[in-house]
Amino acid sequence: MMRLRVNNKKAPIRSIASPSYLSAMTSQDSKSLKGKLALITGCTGGIGYATAIALGRLGCSIAVHYNSAEAKANELVKELEANHPDVKAVAFQADLSGYEGVKKLHGDVVRVLGHPDVLFNNAGVLGGAIGPNGNIQDVSVETFETTWRTNTGTAFLMTQLCLPSMEERKWGRIVFNSRLSLNPKVSFEAFALKQVLPRYVGTGGVVGPHYASSKSAMHGLLHWIASRYAKDGITCNAVAPALIVETTMMANPSEELGPPECWDWAVTEIDVLEETNSYRSIWTPS
């Protein structure tokens, strides 16, 4: 796992889902998250589901967001409550394709559980795939705007709504889910181990320009937020996964798709590390 920093300092490299590292991290950081509340959008599959389990293990209560997968959301809530009696877990339905859905979700979470300490902007849509060899004419302006609103605009608004309470408490963790295909800085070792798909790294990916641009915009957003709110004890970072099973990224999964558990620990570490180590980072496979 490579952590890319924008201050040009050498980035530490950690092995993917190392059991010894996970164990050490869990014991070290569990106190930091006990009593905290995490809001995870798109929480019913893939990285969102795995991250909820990982944060719950560290004593963090979870606001489980879903759009249509109510049964999966309820299953996750039951799993969290059964394994961690001290953790609160509640499912919240909201359609995040529009801004009113974002306001509704935030309001419901605050009313039931309180203000989130941790925000993982994980929800997103593809907006239809034209592939790396498609024609830009095949993406309508309406599709472009809808994809941007759902992936970038709603994440911006949710962050905007959550930040004031984080400022007041002088503590907050914000994470965006970006995409590996937007970043060319991935190690050759990752290619050799087939942890990434080299033909798509740094090319904009396999979906299309609407999706790629909506995800890359998050990098600029997180840099600004991190710089502005670091003095208030708030960090902002991103994870940039490749293709993950149990998501809608690909209709026909292959052996090259990674498991969600490759990323739950990365999100967890970004959320709990202190400001000196968790500041404007983009985590990619390495």
Image (tube, grey):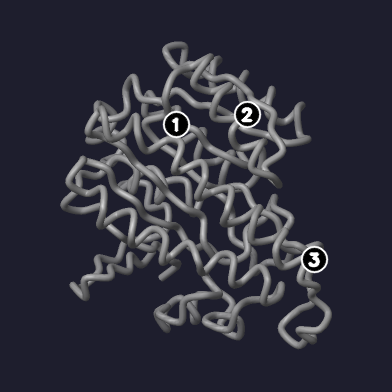
- Say what secondary structure mark 3 lies in: loop
Q: Is residue 229 left or right of residue 142?
A: left
Compare marks 3 and 2 and give the one earlier in the sequence.
Answer: 2
The residue that label 3 is drawn on is 128
The residue that label 1 is drawn on is 38
The type of residue carrying mark 1 is Ala
The type of residue carrying mark 2 is Lys
Q: Residues within 10 Å of mark 3 (few under 14, many from 20)?
A: some
Q: In which quarter of the view is residue 28 placed?
A: top left
The residue that label 2 is drawn on is 104
Picture residue at 57% right of the left edge, 53% below the top: 153
Residue 273 position in % (x across, y down): 25, 44
Q: Residues within 10 Å of mark 1 (few under 14, many from 20)?
A: many
Q: Is residue 51 left or right of residue 222?
A: right
| The label number, if any, that marks residue 143 in the structure image | none
For the residues marked 1 and 3, what is the alpha-carbon distance in whole angstroms? 30 Å
The type of residue carrying mark 3 is Gly
> Between tags 1 and 2, which lies in front?
2
Q: In this orientation, which residue lies closer to the viewer: 36 or 247? A: 36
Picture residue at 60% right of the left edge, 79% below the top: 204
> Between tags 3 and 2, which lies in front?
2
Q: Residues within 10 Å of mark 2 (few under 14, many from 20)?
A: some
Residue 201 position in % (x across, y down): 54, 80
